[in-house]
Image: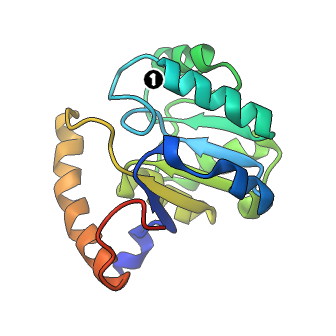
Amino acid sequence: MLERFYPDETADSAYEVDYEAYYRQGYRGIIYDIDNTLVPHGAPADARSVALFARLHEIGFSVMLLSNNKEPRVRSFAQDVKYASYLFKANKPSPEGYREAMRRMGTDEKTTILIGDQLFTDVWGAKNAGIKSILVRPIHPREEIQIVFKRQLEKIVLYFYWRKRKGADGYGKG
């Protein structure tokens, strides 16, 4: 039952993923959450995120920002990183936003990856849409209160996830 929330893979950071390897494996689209995946909650794009999106563009990826946030937040981030389209008020974990992102990128379930920091929105939504998910550590501990409550439940799910992974001790172990 908990498996529906398990990520396909984990990474310490969205900035440490081997994107070239995924491209060689045939992936062509990446869907990102923004807050606490790429920057701290509510923060603008920084030099690191701008460099990442330029790198992804050079590799050949299509990139979509998928957020439950309002348009001004998502639009400004997308404008700053360039090379990314966006969907706001995506109603994650509903699969519709993920499917629309794939449609816009010209990818499908087999060629798309989701990278996000939350099990119950990002990862579960990717699972609902049939795409690969990579869970990353949240960038910053400061979060909105409703997310703080969800993190407590995530700890329980992650305990069983790591236990199933036969003693893997945390993110970045694949």
Residue 54: give x, y in percent of width and height: 69, 26
Does the image show residue 94? Answer: yes
Location of residue 171 by image quarter:
bottom left
Whether residue 132 is situated above or below residue 139 in the rendered picture? below
Camera-side residue: 25 or 99?
Answer: 25
- Location of the N terminus by quadrant is bottom left
Residue 141: give x, y in percent of width and height: 21, 38
Residue 59: give x, y in percent of width and height: 78, 40
**Side (left or right) of 14 relative to 153:** right
Residue 135: give x, y in percent of width and height: 44, 56
SS category of the residue bearing label 1: loop
Q: Residue at x 53, y 13 (%)?
A: 76
Whether residue 35 is situated above or below residue 18 in the rendered picture? above
Could you tell me the amino acid type at mark 1? Answer: Lys
Q: How is the image coloured?
A: rainbow
Does the image show residue 84? Answer: no
Mark 1 closeness class: few <14, some 14–19, many ≥20 residues within 10 Å = few
Whether residue 142 is situated above or below residue 61 in the rendered picture? above
